[in-house]
Amino acid sequence: MHDILSITLIGLALLALLGVVFEEVIHINKAKVTLLLGTLSWLILFINAGGQGEAANAIIHGLNESLTEISQLWLFLIAAMTFVAYLNKKGMIQNIIYWFLPKRMSERKLLFITGLFCFLFSSLADNITATLVSVTLILSLKLPRRKLIRFAALVVFAVNSGGVALITGDVTTLMIFLAGKVSVVDLLVLSIPAFAGVTVLALILSRSMRGEVVISYTPSSARGVDVTIAAIFLLTILLTIFGNAIYQIPPVLTFLAGLAVMFMVARVFEDDSDDDPIFDYIRLVEFETLFFFLGILLLVGMLKEIGVLDNLLVVYQVLPVEGANFAMGMLSSVIDNVPLTAALLKSGLVMSEGQWLQLTYAVGVGGSLLVVGSAAGIVAMSKVPGLTFGRYLRQLLPLAIAYSVGFIASGVVAAWWL
């Protein structure tokens, strides 16, 4: 009976994975698939336990543990995404981009500026927003398709690279941090190898960029309340980093406090009206993404409950730790990095803090190798005309070189820092 149960539950997890991979084929949102199968798997566990005894108590404990982790992740992301949704709706993000861009520049210079902007912006905003804003910029330039795809590949890689060094930038980084494997301060050193990888990729892709572009954009006027809320957002990020490093304050608490301040500031500026209520910006949050994470983490919690995740440790028994981490990064371009990271965290894997930092880089950036390997790639593919799986695959060699450089550098920097 136990074998039949395990096979059934593993089958549900594989079915959910196939639903994520073939979302564009079956035309069913991956959040719907993972949420349905995630909840169904736990219902089967409870029914099989019979509702009494140690087995039922163990399942209740496992579910409560998973829900606690999920709630911290959800609340943090809702607070961060609400800030970004507000600033994006008010045009503040677009204004900041175009205020710093010269009116005329070479394509090569623009390529490097795009990489730098994506790297920095994705540390503050979620990957989806950072990709959408960056893609909007490059589409406005009317570049030839070949060059446009190169820009898109850099956007995807730079967005994913920028997110690994801050818990506000990437969900996998946040998950590894919340599991207590790395500290906020230690994560900051990952910005060095991550930016090195972006620089290498920009150098490779810029070889045939010899043209010139003209940028025409008239920034909208910034209101005092919008500038104030942007400042609150940046201050919240800084206080999150220092508060956790010095006083061990959970990041979710700092961000919820910052969100509350944002609401009060809108009231003081009399910007919280019936026509534009400040609470409505919570509705602009990507709840599809949040429900996807919920479904995935429920499935991973279930796999831990039945002991399947122990098999992931086989890779670390066959390969050296660094080699296994490198392989996990490449695997994240095929398997979504959120379930992969969750599975590794729940598998009982034991590594040094430096090795966890290197894994953080690997699973955060490795998904860039294929266009379907990350949320940034999926967004870019849906927005950039002509960007297909095959055309993105032609950039695999430069992407792999940049990923390898960043991975090696992450090990060197971690060994130096720790």
Image (cartoon, rainbow, N blue to C red):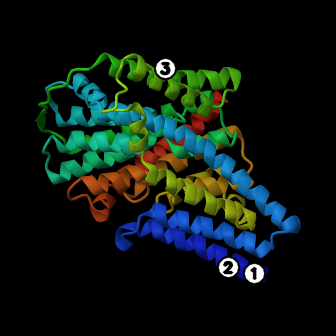
Q: Across the whole image, how many numbered discs are drawn on residues?
A: 3
Q: In terms of sequence position, does the residue under pointer 2 or pointer 3 come before the other? A: 2
Q: As rendered, which of 360 and 139 lies closer to the eye?
A: 139
Return the mark for residue 235: 3
The local secondary structure at tag 2 comes to helix
Q: Is residue 372 left or right of residue 412?
A: left
User: In x, y percent, where is residue 368?
Assistant: 42, 51
Return the mark for residue 136: none
Give the residue at x 56% y 40%.
75
Return the mark for residue 3: 1
The local secondary structure at tag 1 comes to helix
Judging by the rendered image, the residue that carries numbered circle 2 is: 7
2 vs 3, front mark: 3
3 vs 1, front mark: 3
User: In x, y percent, where is residue 392?
Assistant: 31, 58
Quarter residue 356 falls in: top right
Height in image: 111 above or below 26?
above
Quarter residue 216 falls in: top left
Mark 3, other Cα within 10 Å: few <14 / some 14–19 / many ≥20: few
Q: Is residue 289 visible?
A: yes
Height in image: 17 above or below 322?
below
Give the residue at x 45% y 63%.
30
Residue type, numbered disc 1: Asp
Residue type, numbered disc 3: Leu
Q: Is residue 358 visible?
A: no
Whether tag 2 and tag 1 are in contact, CB under 8 A, the answer is: yes
Height in image: 52 above or below 298?
below
Marks 2/1: CA distance? Answer: 6 Å
Q: As rendered, which of 404 and 218 lies closer to the eye?
A: 218
Residue type, numbered disc 2: Ile
User: In x, y percent, where is residue 282?
Assistant: 43, 39
Where does the N terminus fall, quadrant-wise?
A: bottom right
